[in-house]
Amino acid sequence: MADISCTFYKEPLWMGRFFGFVSTYFQFFRRSTNPFLVILFHFFMRGLFIFLSLVAGDVLHAQVVIRGRVLDLSSRKPLSNVGVGLDKSTDKVLTAADGSFVIQGLEPGFHTVTAQLDGYDNETSSEMLFTYDKSPEVVIEMQSLSQGIGEVNIRKTNLQRREAESPVSSQKLSIREIERNPGGNRDISKIIQSLPGVISIPGFRNDVVIRGGSPSENKFYLDGVEIPIINHFQTQGSTGGPVGMLNVNFIKEVNFYTGAFPVNYANGLSSVLDFRQMDGNANKAKYRFTLGSSDVGFTADGPLSKKTTYIFSARQSYLQGLFSVLGLPFLPNFIDYQAKVKVKLNDKDDITFLMVGAVDFFKLNLNANDNVTDSATLKTNKFILNYLPVYKQWNYTFGTVYTHFGAKSKTQTFLSRNMLSNTSFKYKNNDESSEANRIFTYASTEEENKLRIENSRNLGRWKLLVGGGTEFVQYGVDNKAKVLIPGAPGTAGTVKDIQFRSMLELFKYSGFVRGYRNVMGTGTLSFAGRLDGNGFNKSMGNPLNQPTVSVSASLPTAISGLFFNANMGQFTQLPSYTMLGYRNSYGSFDNLNRIKYMRNRMVAAGLQYNKVKDTKITWEGFYKNYSNYPFALNDSICLGNLGTDFAVLGNEPVSSVSKGKAYGMEFLVQRRSRSGLYGILSYTLSWSQFNDKNGKSVRSAWDSRHTLSMVGGVKLKRNWELGAKLRFATGRPYTPDDISRSLVKANWDVRGTALPNYNLLNAGRLGNFSQLDIRVDKVWYFKKASLNLYMDIQNALNNAYLGPQTLIAAQDAAGNLISDPSAPLPSYKGEYLLNSSGFLQPSIGVIWDF
């Protein structure tokens, strides 16, 4: 056994410090040795708030105007004499013959509009932000009761609506819940952690872990167009990353499915996130400047012509310069952009163009230890520099959506292209002067070209959706690496040089159908089926059937407004292109005859109570049965346990032999604001298990037993708003290190980090996690502009979270690694760094609309 000593390093490790996103100001003053600067900073911020409150506070008394139109959902004809008003008001105005309406005399802020007309189901718009000089047009589409399947006299708000296909396992977030989320940093991946089924993962990353599934099981759609990447620095082969790249200024609503997935949204096992963007301002151009804790951004929206509107944004991170000044060993940087153009061709036809993309850079600061005297910092910096790679990643998605409304139908055509480029390299001691020092070089691209057509129509009491799609995929990789192949216990294993280039071209195809109708007055019944296939191998060439059935019914109990909802279905997902495109030393696809579609057979059922106004109350239970999950042959582990690292996932020999299961229950209370008070209370109890290398079912890395989230906010007088979020989660399992094999010189020189002991897969469990986040907003409305200042305090109670201790090779005073003469194999001595994350992170943001 290698000799182990222990050094307690009380500062968080690089990931916590890097991706914790402490405010620029806070980081600077926290490290400053001049106490006068700290005092000056606090007085400056306090003075700024007081000055703006006194000088600009509420001197303006102008009122906003809401304009909009009301249309028949099926025919697209304007509806006249519709009663329209604020959702929280009894005052109504009537629409004109062209369906238009005007509501005057309102205070600026977030508003929703409700429309009521005999013979039609009541309809409420998405929540929107209205200011003196920026009032987006409100378009409300109403469904006739003779054709609809709405809950007549039962459904009170959009929040309580039950979708026929997804009556369970679906949630919605409004614009206020997105923009004002405490600790969310305007990052959608962090914001959805408030919802049931979402496991809170402490630390620096945005990995979305849903109902015991891995982060690679999630799919994302933007206005119906699939976008494979929503995070900067994304793990290829998975979906996680540290920083969200979507601009929440554009998002008007998020539909979040943790089961009962829409049949037209495919290829996901754990969740589907459906982002809906707002349209550009049809009246005049408006701009927004945003300064956050890690980046600066600019947004513009307005008309391009009478029938064309646009929205556009760009963001630039300033972390690279900041981290260089702070002397951190890594220098990240990112740029992202997002745009949408909508053209209204006529009353029944429109076309939308959208794009979203990012460029990410990650460099090493080789001068991080200059002038550093603290031994723990020196060791940590050298450890980080010796194993972190340098990489560059960029991606984009371009999409076009054409929509045609028929007499009783709607046809949509989705055409899109997305691409990912991922390059990285690592050399021993970061010395690139010799090829002998190369540990790995990696370059990969993924390209997808997609076409999907959908047609939905009313057929009397049934509503039908039929569609299909095709994709052409190109995947390329050039990989040179030293790979450690674990050996038998007591041996060091084998370091093997691999080198291959691969090009994969793949056709994928799909077809789907869904039918649903109203039953028993307020209930619904839905049937759906989907076929997916591709030409990679014979197994996946046969279209795979994915049937689902959903039911919703009012219970005949003394408690009115209580509904039983359920869904049962089979869902599949194609393994990542890194697995499909991996080649062996003979140049053939190594996983060709071993890989299949991953499969999840899922049942979810629960109750929903609708009688509390503006409030959704649900209880659900779920059971997921996994099969055909990829199993890594070299490391002997199911890939369902992986996906939260920055390495490429799946670029290795695998076989679709693993099985798993996840089950549990969820509780939700969600309230939308009428009186200024809003919030979400969610609780999840879950179990998650996957097979180990011996075929035994053991707990997975996502087996977080209890997860509790409470988030709420209140709007106060003079445009102040206060919000707080409290989270608690049981510690997740982890796999202990294989200490002796990790410190073997041949192994450590290749990996630079510890080897997990997969004989003890997820045998350890971390401590419980809890965090309180607080956010305070103050908005000033001017005649032609508005200013929003906010302070967001993450981890307000300064709770430290201890992860597994980090094993490193011991270093002498000069930074050289120390050999261990007592080890049976040539090895280094080892020591541990205390892996502590979680510290007080205040940040200040500025949003200027003009």
Image (tube, helix red, strand yellow):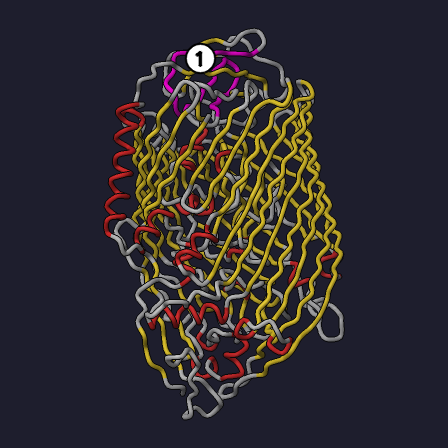
Question: Which one is nearer the viewer's eye here, 50 or 207?
Answer: 50
Amino acid type assigned to the residue bearing label 1 in the image:
Ile
Percent position (x, y) of residue 786? 40, 25
Question: Which one is nearer the viewer's eye here, 194 or 498?
Answer: 498
Q: Circle 1: is it few (<14), some (14-19), or many (20+) Cα within 10 Å?
A: some
Screen quadrant of the N terminus: bottom left
Q: Which quadrant of the figure has residue 578? A: bottom right
Check if residue 61 falls in the magenta segment: no
Q: Is residue 831 left or right of residue 399?
A: left
Q: Which quadrant of the figure has residue 17? A: bottom left
Q: Which residue is mark 1?
A: 103
For image coordinates 69% across by 41% down, the residue present is 416
Percent position (x, y) of residue 158? 46, 29
For image coordinates 62% across by 15% down, the residue present is 77
Q: Which residues are magenta?
A: 99-125
Q: Which quadrant of the figure has residue 326? A: bottom left
Reply above or below: 807 against 790.
below
Reply above or below: 563 against 386.
above
Question: Which one is nearer the viewer's eye here, 243 or 542?
Answer: 243
Percent position (x, y) of residue 82? 50, 12
Reply above or below: 155 against 535.
above
Q: Is residue 765 visible?
A: no
Reply above or below: 260 against 784.
below
